[in-house]
Amino acid sequence: MPRLSIIIPCYFNEDNIPITGSTLIENEKNFVNIGESVEFEYILVDDGSKDNTFDAIIEFQKHYPHKVQAIKLAANVGSHNAILAGMTHATGDCCVILAADLQDPPELIVQMYNYWAKGIKLVLANRTQREESFSQRLFANTFHVLIKKLALKNVPDGGFDLVLFDKALKEEVVRMAEKNTHILYLLVWLGYDYVNIPYTRKQREIGVSRWTLAKKVKLLIDSFIAFSFFPIRAISAIGLTLGIIAFIYSAAVVIGRITGLSPGVEGWSSLMVVLLCVSAFQMIALGIIGEYVWRTLDASRKRPNFVIERVLREPSSPEEKKNP
């Protein structure tokens, strides 16, 4: 019987977990209704929450000990590292990444699983509309347009959070263990053909999102640096353009002086404007290069992406039962 692992990163989700858990169990009936026999595995990863999220996960695990893995990370390391932690513990033939707040509909999972059963190794649920505020939609749409135009050409418009992927893809991502990256885009980067299922992302009903603007900006920077050299090329192009302009301007000044057609440019203000503009470009360029250098240094240290404080699960094999 195929096993389906559903990975759920959790951060300040103590009120969501009971509803999410019961919804997932109820969603299993959709597989029965279409005659699919599937073994379910739910991996809930507490990403260093400071509320009672892990207690809620434990309560869910007590009711379904053979289905639920409860993982607690020692510190908050971000949802993508929490997802990676879940992937390292997933034992399914295929995996699903699902948000704990149920903004992405679990009922799509059965449709996604059907594609996997037909041999499709990567299935994306593509957000075509959002039940969110104008500012949230604006930032999200800008984010995905930039990524699609300048980094990964093959990502779907609008992005995605709900994804199903084969065990082979999971093993590749876990083996790479990349730092400061976008796990979902990394699955697309692998190059497998995928099926895209459109849906409308729901508005969050319970709790307050901890997905702050600072975290969104960091993810945007991480995604660009992980999948694109455009910022470096942009520095080269702008530098070359400024150099050509400076050469033409210098030549015009020299010729003007020699021929007497122009007395040249005089004035402290003009000089300061040029100096400040060039200096600002240099600092921005150093900052962009510094981002690439820092991530290279971070990767070279080989520190773990996450530290697991506690794992609760039932042994799934005779060997594990003998040596828990």
Image (spheres, rainbow, N blue to C red):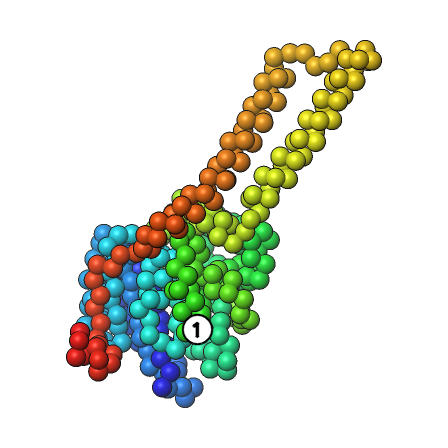
**Residue at (47, 44) in percent of width and height:** 292
Instruction: Tell which residue pokes out farthest to the bottom in this image.
Output: 35
Three-letter amino acid code at disc 1?
Answer: Ala
**x then y, percent, for residue 297:** 40, 45
Quadrant of the snapshot with the N terminus: bottom left
**x then y, percent, for residue 57:** 23, 65
Quadrant of the snapshot with the C terminus: bottom left
Instruction: Tell which residue pokes out farthest to the front in this image.
Output: 300
Q: Nearer the viewer, residue 237 or 94?
A: 237
Residue 96, quarter of picture: bottom left
The answer to whether any part of residue 301 appears in the image is: yes
Secondary structure state at the residue bearing disc 1: helix
**Residue at (41, 74) in percent of width and height:** 167
Q: Nearer the viewer, residue 5 or 243?
A: 243
Q: Is residue 301 above or below residue 313?
A: above
The answer to whether any part of residue 63 appears in the image is: no
Q: Is residue 30 above or below residue 303?
A: below
**x then y, percent, for residue 119:** 50, 80
Residue 161, quarter of picture: bottom left
How many numbered marks appear? 1
Residue 63, quarter of picture: bottom left
Dot 1 crowding, Cα within 10 Å, few <14, some 14–19, many 20+: few
**Residue at (71, 22) in percent of width and height:** 250
Q: Nearer the viewer, residue 38 or 246?
A: 246
**x then y, percent, for residue 55:** 19, 62
**Residue at (60, 42) in percent of width and height:** 234
The residue tagged 1 is 168
